[in-house]
Image (spheres, coloured by chain):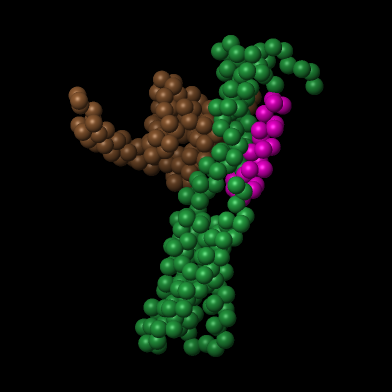
Amino acid sequence: MSKPEFGEVDTLWANDYLQELDTALVRRRVWDRSIAEEIHAHLLDSAEGAVREGLSATAAQARALERMGSPQEVAQAALVAQRVRITPRAFRVALIIGIVLALIDILPMTGKTVFLVASITISATVLSALIPGKAWLWTITIGGFLPFANLMVTGRYGGFLALAMAAFGALVGLGTQRLLRPD
Amino acid sequence: MNPERLKGHLDMLLLSVLATQPAHGYAVIERLRNGSGGAFDLPEGTIYPALHRLEAAGLVKSEWATVAGRKRRVYRLAERGSRALADQRQEWRTFAAAVNAVAGGQP
């Protein structure tokens, strides 16, 4: 490929930034990576705008990259936005899990204890790892219905162990999230 | 201006920019920067997650389009976004008037 003329903006200079952004998005487990495509066009627009203002191609590229913010900063903002987006859906899922497990608990079935313990712990772990800022919410919604349903039906308080299991799962999720977080 | 100060008002600013006409991300940034006389100069890449969040909340809509030979995602205000913007503007006027009344007077 020929070297661009002075004032002309080619597109290869943006590749390092985009590669780094992609890595940062993957490490943060940001699912929607269409942002990279938008940022690619944005960098080119920005550099072209700077060239029109009279900057050299090199200076224009440097300014476009500087104004964009670091790839890590952009990826972190994308992760925060993703968590905000999925929280209402995750809350509905947690509610459903909590209610279904409470119903299963009061059904006259045998051999369900292991299933209930595993379901409560694993679902609280997964949701807390995905959205760590709401670990308390996953504890209450997943483990909160079962004790009250159990208390109303059997008059026993043993069901409150479900809250402890959910809290344990949430803590495991938080720990997992901390171990895996990129920075 | 410290970008941190913008955070609580970014949604309203983005909706306001899109209320004038649909735009892709770069145009949104340009309008923010020019409209504020350069005061709103936040890391440009952080605008996109905010726009995606607004879209997920149903306040803006987007579609991919090829503009000047380049593929871009063009955002426009949704009807729900117009109502949210009206509410946020009203809230801002009340807040700004209160701050001015307390802190904006002569010493």
- Quadrant of residue B79 within the rendered picture: top left
Rendered shade, chain A: green
The location of residue A182, given as percent across then percent down, is 62, 48
Q: Which residue: 52% across, 87% down?
A: A109
Q: Which residue: 50% across, 53% down?
A: A86
Rendered shade, chain B: brown
In the visual, does A70 lie left or right of B2? right
The location of residue B98, given as percent across then percent down, is 22, 35
The secondary structure that dominates the magenta segment is helix
Q: Which residue: 43% across, 36% down?
A: B4
- Quadrant of residue A157 within the rendered picture: bottom left
User: From which residue to which does the magenta span run?
Assistant: A11-32
The location of residue A118, given as percent across then percent down, is 57, 75
Query: Total of numbered circles in the picture?
Result: 0
In magenta stretch: residue A139: no
**Is residue B82 in view from this perspective?**
no
Q: Is residue A135 above or below residue B13?
A: below
In magenta stretch: residue A17: yes
Q: Is residue A144 above or below residue A18?
A: below
Q: Is residue A18 above or below residue A103?
A: above
For the N terminus of chain A, give its image quadrant. Answer: top right
Q: Is residue A90 above or below residue A115?
A: above
Q: Which residue: 50% across, 73% down?
A: A165
Q: Residue furthest front?
A: B107
**Is residue B13 in view from this perspective?**
yes
